[in-house]
Amino acid sequence: MRGLFFACSLGLSCQLWGGQGFYRFDQTLPEGPQLEHFAQIFLKQAEKLLPPVVRDHLPPLTVVFKERESNIPFLTSISTAKVTAASGLIPLSLPNCGEEGAESASLEEEGDDGAPEEQPPVSASKGHPLVYGDYNHKTHTIRLNPRFKLDLTTQNQENRMYRCGHGSMYRLLLATVIHETAHAYDFSNIRTSAEQKEFAACASDNRCDAVKKFKNRHLSVSDHPVFKKIVHDGLTKALASPDPYERKNSYIEYFAVNFEFWIMDPIEFNKHRPALAAFFREYFGYDPAVGRGQMKKQREVPTEQMGIMTKIPLIHYPTFSEIDFAPNKVERADFFLIAAGSAGESRFGHVSFRFKMCKRSLQPGETCSAEDKAEDLVTTYAADLREATWVNPIKGLSGGYFSATSMVYLPTALDNYAYLESRTLEAYPLKLTLRQKEKLVLQVLTDFWSFEGRYKFISKNCSTEARDILKSILGVHHFASQYPIMPMKLKEVLIKENLIDPKPIHVYTSAVEKIEKRLELAMGTDKKKKYATKLIGLAPQSRMAWYKKHMKSDLKYLDKMAWRHVEEEVSRARQVKETHRLGVKYSSDMRRLTKEVGIYREGYGIPSDFRVVIPDGAKLPYQEELAVFEAAEKAVHTALSAK
């Protein structure tokens, strides 16, 4: 640790200079040796928390307690003498503190050289400036709110506590220094030694253009393409946040806030935002959770030992089920391609991910036995149209719809696409390493709980989200020279990148195609396509009359089975369509039911735990109508079985 020494005299400006230390304390207003002593301890502690790469690449930073030169003074409405708890100084927007609707705002302006310069966050509800600190990139100075001086004594460390955020005013002061240091590193536009090696090897890399583009970014981390893919380009709303201030000024504050929480509380951060924590560990070569030293591969903690809550609720109104979406229970991840549909919003196709699940934990390289196989999961990034009665193309093009992550069982996905929309689905196994597969699962898990962006049919759609997720786990060079925005184009790029094979491992045919194949076995007719579409539209009695007309009287056993299979597929397609029709008919009641079902989560990002509350006596508004429909459909199958 680099030493610190004092240069001060009583009654004059007193300075604590870190001779070779990283932080240099400039005490312009003398407060006596006691404050100076605690400031020395405090700055040593802050320096120990930093990754070595940050200290090595930045010049020493001056730290000063000083009022911001502004026409609005710091917290003028609060008397320092009367502050006995932290609540008077902490932001009203800190999570879980009980205040609502008081989110801090931030103004950003550019300095003379174009780099961002922070301005005070201000309470939106009362107008009080709530400035903890800021960073001046020209003078390499971190300026702290003078009222934090109260928190450099042992007594205040113990007494000035609160139940959210960083937990105490002293830790908030420490976090403020870390936060501003993150800005200092980011604004310095630094390239790590690993990045420099990549740039040096560019001449022998056929994707050199991508390397140059990566090299010529303007900020160290917040402009890093992998970082941006992890937090999603165009991110507009984090459903659960350690500090809402992260959403100010796009990626700049998102990096600083998350770096601050990663350093201050690494174990909890690993649990709540594992994908981002993994990026920080790899980028900085440092893990604050293990000895605060250089990261060693053997020190990497397995995901299952990090305490990440991997359970997710799958809602089946008015009930729900739980599934354990742990990385070591995912046998394989597939690129899932859905063919184009007849509707305008689905005419280009759709992409998602399919996960082959196992009931038990798998060892590396182990396959899941037949008896241990669990229901496959399908996750997708799509426009949230639950509140829409029709799709507005203008809103779809301009980002008028939110983009949300949904997860369903495979049979539900087949109902939605193969039977309701008569679209074919193809599964292509992704060629991922064990670590890459784990990253994909953790990113999807994080997004399931905390992502909501803006959906644009052309530039920010299912294909771009899937591409960006894969890029975040594979590295900056993948898809570097190509920007696929359509499902079929993304498939072509994945084949070219050797991430999938040209031939799918599984094809789920549409309802019409399935009925056609069954009819071919039962009738051997070339009119099967015409008949398939007609059968789906026939009511039970009319359909039974159609069967009597076309079925032979002396059917053999295999012929009877073929006709039963025809009816099974027809009946399933009709039930899916009827459920959808009733859902549209009772859309207002379904929206009400959706809002009544509450999912309560603990913590930001991936929650520590959750509970689902469904009102007593809740039932589908069309439950009785659907039961009558299903009984009539079943009668047809029973009649065919009796023949």
Image (cartoon, rainbow, N blue to C red):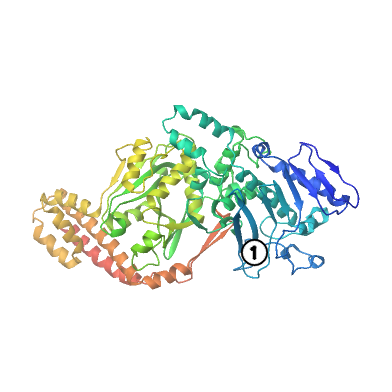
Q: Quadrant of residue 512?
A: bottom left
Check the image and name the residue furthest to the right: 10
Q: Does residue 417 sit above or below 125 in this rendering?
A: above
Q: Residue at x 30, y 37 (%)?
A: 502
Q: What residue type is labelled 1?
A: Val
Q: Which residue is drawn at 53% across and 43% down?
A: 224
Where does the C terminus fall, quadrant-wise? Answer: bottom left
x and y, in percent, of residue 350 in the image? 33, 51
Q: Residue at x 44, y 58 (%)?
A: 454
Q: In which quarter of the image is residue 80?
A: bottom right
Residue beneath disc 1:
122
Q: Using the rendered image of the protein, determine whether residue 424 is visible from the camera's viewpoint.
A: yes
Q: Which residue is drawn at 47% across and 51% down?
A: 233
Q: As rendered, which of 91 and 611 lies closer to the eye?
A: 91
x and y, in percent, of residue 157 in the image? 78, 55
Q: As rendered, which of 574 and 390 lies closer to the eye?
A: 390
Q: Using the rendered image of the protein, determine whether residue 358 is visible from the camera's viewpoint.
A: no
Q: As rendered, which of 613 and 135 lies closer to the eye?
A: 135
Q: Does residue 589 sit above or below 157 in this rendering?
A: below
x and y, in percent, of residue 573 in the image? 26, 59
Q: Quadrant of residue 151?
A: bottom right
Q: Classify mark 1: residues with Cα within 10 Å, few (<14), some (14-19) or many (20+).
A: many
Q: Give the left or right position of residue 127, taking residue 366 as reference.
A: right
Check the image and name the residue furthest to the top: 204
Mark 1, secondary structure of its residue: strand
Where does the N terminus fall, quadrant-wise? Answer: top right
x and y, in percent, of residue 622 in the image? 34, 71
In the rendered picture of this protein, how many numbered marks are placed on residues? 1
Q: Give the left or right position of residue 396, taking residue 78 as reference.
A: left
Q: Does residue 97 sit above or below 428 in this rendering?
A: below
Q: Give the left or right position of residue 203, taking residue 309 as reference.
A: left
